[in-house]
Image: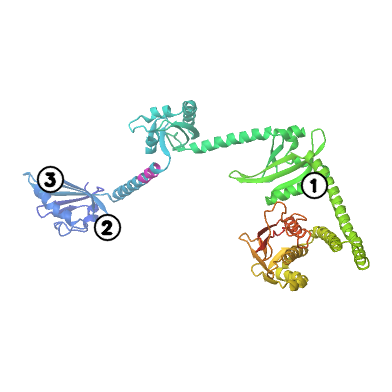
Amino acid sequence: MLRQLQAGVAILEGPDLRYSFINDRMRELVGEGQLGQRIADQPGLLSSTFLEVLPRIYAAGEEYTAKACACGPHHCYDLSVQPYHDEEGKVAGLLLLAVDVSEQEVARQRAHELALTTRHLDARLRVLTETAPLITYTVDANGKTTYASPQWYRFTGQPPTADLTAIWPLLIHPDDRLRVLYEAEFARRAGAGWNFEYRLRRYDGAYRWLLSRALPEMHPPDAPVYWHGALTEVHQERELSEARRRGEAELRFLADSIPELVWTASAEGLVEYYNQYTLEYTGLTKEELGPTGWVGLLQMEEQAAAARRWVQSVASGTEFEGEYRMRRHDGVYRWHVIRARQLSDGSGLRWFGTCTDIEEQYRLRQVLQTQYDELSRAHHNLDTFVYAASHDLRQPTNNLRGLFEELRRSVTFADPEQALMLQMVDGALSQLDSTLIDLATTIRTQRQQQEPIEILDLALVLEEILLVLRPEIMQRGARIDVLVQEAPGLRYSRANLRSVVHNLVSNALKFSHPVRPPHIVLRSYLTAEDQPVLEVHDNGLGMHIDDPLHPVFQLFARQHPHVDGTGVGLYLVQRIVSSQGGHVSVVSTLGEGTTFTVYWTVPTT
C-alpha cells in the first residue's frame, strides 16, 4: 500500500535515521539511496535546513509539518514527519511523507501576484475616480447606493456616516425629483443605463445642474446587479444654453417685429428662416418661398445676375450687396437694397441678410440726379459764358486803352487835376484788365481740377515754375532756395501743382519788403502720418491772419492796397488744394514775412 501511494514515503530507523523503506515517489525526491544508508549521506533534493531539523524531531518525539518546501529549482513539497515507537513505547524512527505541491504552489503564487495586481489597479482606479472633477457612484438593482466618491461629500456637505440611499432623493430639486426617481427605477428594471440632467442641492444650499450617466455591470446570462456611474456638473453649460435660447427667442421676436425683410441662410447659401414681415410683404408661406425665395421675387431679367453674385459671395465669403426690384404681394415691384453678411461662430457658418425697401429714396435719388445734371450743365454753361465774356471783354478794354493813349498824346485839358485824372483812368483800365485775366484764370483752374493724376518730380516742376518767373526774380534780386530732398516726389495733377506754386511764389515776390531783397524757401517733407507737405516761406511784408475785414483766402480780399493785385491768387490756391482733400495753413508776422504750408492729400483714384 505504501508503494502505491501517490505521495513519497520513507521510513528512517534509529537515531542515525537510516533508510529502511523508500517508495518510488520518494526516490524522485531523495534519489537512488540504499536501504541502511543514512539520510544525511543521501539527502537528494532535501534542503540542509530540513535535515538539521530531523534529529531534533526524533529526540522530541513530536510531529512536524513543513508546507511548500522548495526542493530543487522546480519542485515544492509538503513534508510531514511523524515519529513511530517500538513495543516499549520508545521512538524507534521517523516516518517521512512528501506530497508534491509544485503545481498548487505555482497556482498560489500566480493567484498572489494577481491579487497584488488587482490591488494596485484598484488603488489606481480609486485615485483616478477620487481626483477627477466629478462624482462617481455605484448602486445595486434595488437602488441602494453602495459607493460614492469623496467628491459627493465635498459637494453636498453631508457627513460620511449619512445614509446615501435615503439622503440622495432629498437633495434633488423638488421639480426634478419625481422624474429622476422614475427614470432611474425604469432603467434598473430594464437592465439598461441612464443619461439625464437634474438639479442637486450643494453644500451652500444652491441648486446646481448635474449630468448623471450610468451603465450596468454585465455578466451574461445573469441580470445586472450593479450600476456604475458619474455625476458631472453642467450648470454653466446649462445656463449658457438657456441664455442662448432666450437670446435667439428675443432676436427672433425682434426680427419678426421690425418692418423689414430679414432672413438667414446656411453656409451653402440656402435660406432657412424668414421673419414674419417677409411673409406679410410677399404674401407667401415659408414653404412657398423655399431656400432661394428672395431670388425668385426679383424682376425676371435681374434674377440670373443676382443669383450669380450670391453664389460668388457664398463661395468667397465676401459681403453681398445690391439694388434690385422685388415683387410685393400685390404684384408691384419696388426697389430694395439686399445685403447679406457671413457670421462664423461655434455653431458653424451662417448668413444673415436683409431686404430694405428704398423705393422712395430711389425715386428721390433719380430726381436729385436729374437736378444735379441740370445744375451741372447750367454751371458749365455759366463757366463757358464767363470765360468767353472775360476773354471777349479784354478786346474792348484794349481798345479803350489805345484810345486813352491816343487822347493823352493828342489832346490837352485846361484842368489843374489833369495828371491825377489821367493816372486814375489808367489805373482803372489796368485793374479792369487784371480782373478779366484773373477771372479767366479762375475758370480755367476749375476746369484743370479734373486733369489726370500722375507721379511728379517735384524738383523738376519747381524748376519749370521758377523759370517762368525768372524775369521778376531777376528784377527784384530775389534768392530762391529749393529743398525737396525729404519728399522729392508727389502724386498730383501737374496743372494744379503749377498753379498753386506759381501763385504762392509770385505773391512772395510781389509783396516783398522794400528795404531787403526777397528770400523765398520752398521745402517739401512728410508728416508723421506720411502726408506730403510743401512749405513756402518768404521775408516779405507779412499780413494780418485774423483780420475780419480782409480774410486771407477770400476772393478779391487784399491787405496791401498799395501793391498792384486783384485778390484772386490765394483764393485759387485754397480752392485747388481743398478740392483735392487737402488744406492750406498760414503763419505770418507783419514786417517779417509769411509761411504758407500746403498739406497735399493724395487722391485714391
Tell me if 334 is positioned left or right of 156 in this view: right
| First in sequence: mark 3 vs mark 2 | 3
Taking depth in this image into account, of 446 and 80 the one nearest to the observer is 446
Query: What separation in Å lies between label 3 and label 2 (alpha carbons)?
Result: 29 Å
Q: Amino acid at mark 2?
A: Pro
Furthest residue in direction right, as rendered: 410
Q: Which residue is tagged 2? A: 73
Q: Amino acid at mark 1?
A: Ala
Q: Are marks 1 and 2 in contact (CB under 8 Å)?
A: no
Tell me if 209 is positioned left or right of 124 in this view: right
Q: Residue at x 78, y 61 (%)?
A: 565
Q: Residue at x 70, y 33 (%)?
A: 276
Classify 170 as above or below 455: above
Of tags 3 and 1, the one toward the viewer is 1
- Type of secondary structure dominating the magenta stretch: helix
Q: Secondary structure at mark 2?
A: loop
Q: Secondary structure at mark 1?
A: helix
> How far across and down, in percent of the image, does residue 482 sit?
68, 70
Q: Residue at x 50, y 38 (%)?
A: 236
Taking depth in this image into account, of 504 and 195 the one nearest to the observer is 504
Image quadrant in which you'd find residue 131: top left
Query: What separation in Å lies between label 1 and label 2 (alpha carbons)?
Result: 93 Å
Other residues around mark 3 within 10 Å, as few (<14) / some (14–19) / many (≥20): some
Q: Amino acid at mark 3?
A: Glu
Q: Which residue is tagged 3? A: 62
Taking depth in this image into account, of 354 and 390 the one nearest to the observer is 390
**Label number found at residue 304:** 1
